[in-house]
């Protein structure tokens, strides 16, 4: 059976911003990505709530199409996910439908309250269904990466997917995502782009490396060239 990954997010543009390269990388593997969007996004701008949420559904569908992922909407109130008693049961129902082999969700220490609510609800809903890993946060604050994904070849798709969210002034998120991508790659001694995730280990422990796209290529951290050796022997 085809491997499936669920990406659980709070708002219609989160998957593109926090995991656009990762999801695009999955599209080149035999892995199906299902984006679950908890809120309707109707507080993300000055437009009337109904108008804005309808626009944001269309933007999310367009972004998911660029990433070649399926998208599922839970339609809960934007800005109030921590007050939604049925958040984890709705996410659990989506998991029952998708049967994911790996669950990715916002980081539990993310800056946004809706994101933190999704993290806890996803962890509760995951139970023993599948291993859970957290997405990176805005500018990487509080994330302790356990795995990196080489997203260098997927930057253009990620860029175009983020820019689908025209109601959100997306250029500002694109610039931050690109900066973080360069930083995560530099942590691996790599000149391209990378995305990081933080595996949440629990019992039974699961090695998730086979469920992830490839990491940045390994480079030696010391210069072992013939010239360097010659200099050392002087
Ligand atoms: Zn968000």
Image (cartoon, rainbow, N blue to C red):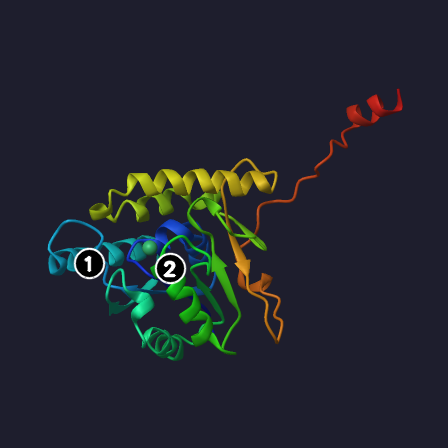
Q: In which quarter of the image is residue 72?
A: bottom left
Between 121 and 102, the one lying in front of the other is: 121
Name the residue: 46% across, 61% down.
108
Between 104 and 209, the one lying in front of the other is: 104
Kindly tell me whether mark 2's CB lies below 8 Å from ligand 1: yes
Q: Quadrant of residue 211?
A: bottom right
Name the residue: 45% across, 53% down.
22
Name the residue: 35% across, 52% down.
16
* In this view, 123 is above or below 215: below
Image position, residue 77 (x, y; %): 23, 66
- Secondary element under disc 2, as helix, strand or loop, is helix
Q: Are marks 2 and 1 in contact (CB under 8 Å)?
A: no
Q: Which residue lies furthest to the top in this view?
A: 234
- Which residue is identified by label 1? 42
Image position, residue 74 (x, y; %): 27, 70
Q: Quadrant of residue 189?
A: top right
Q: How crowded is mark 1: few (under 14 residues within 10 Å), some or many (20 or more)?
A: many
Distance in Å between CA atoms under marks 2 and 1: 15 Å
Between 152 and 77, the one lying in front of the other is: 77
| Relative horizontal placement of residue 12, taking residue 18 as reference (left or right) | left
Q: How crowded is mark 2: few (under 14 residues within 10 Å), some or many (20 or more)?
A: many
Q: Can residue 86 be seen in this view?
A: yes
Name the residue: 42% across, 47% down.
138
| Relative horizontal placement of residue 117, taking residue 185 as reference (left or right) | left
- Secondary element under disc 1, as helix, strand or loop, is loop
* In this view, 159 is above or below 104: above
- Which residue is identified by label 2? 115
Identify the mark nearer the N-term, 2 or 1: 1
| Relative horizontal placement of residue 72, taking residue 220 as reference (left or right) | left
* In this view, 14 is above or below 31: above
Q: Say which quadrant the C terminus sits in.
A: top right
């Amino acid at each position: 059976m085809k491997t499936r990954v669920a990406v659980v997010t709070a708002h219609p543009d989160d998957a593109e911003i926090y995991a656009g390269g990762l999801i695009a990388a999955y599209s080149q593997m035999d892995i199906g990505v299902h984006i679950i969007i908890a809120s309707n996004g109707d507080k993300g701008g000055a437009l009337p709530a109904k108008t804005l949420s309808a626009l944001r559904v269309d933007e999310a569908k367009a972004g998911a199409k660029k990433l070649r992922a399926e998208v599922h909407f839970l339609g809960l109130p934007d800005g109030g996910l921590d007050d939604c008693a049925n958040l984890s049961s709705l996410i659990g129902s989506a998991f029952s439908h998708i049967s994911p082999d790996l669950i990715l969700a916002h980081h539990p220490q993310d800056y946004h309250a809706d994101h933190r609510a999704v993290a806890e609800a996803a962890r509760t809903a995951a139970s023993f269904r599948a291993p859970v890993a957290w997405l990176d946060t805005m500018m990487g604050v509080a994330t302790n990466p356990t795995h990196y994904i080489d997203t260098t070849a997927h930057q253009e798709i990620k860029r175009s997917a983020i820019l689908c969210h025209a109601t959100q002034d997306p250029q500002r998120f694109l610039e931050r995502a690109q900066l973080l991508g360069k930083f995560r790659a530099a942590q691996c001694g790599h000149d391209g782009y990378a995305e990081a995730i933080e595996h949440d280990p629990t019992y039974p422990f699961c090695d998730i490396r086979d469920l992830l796209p490839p990491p940045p290529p390994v480079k030696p951290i010391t210069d072992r060239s013939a010239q360097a050796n010659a200099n050392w022997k002087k």
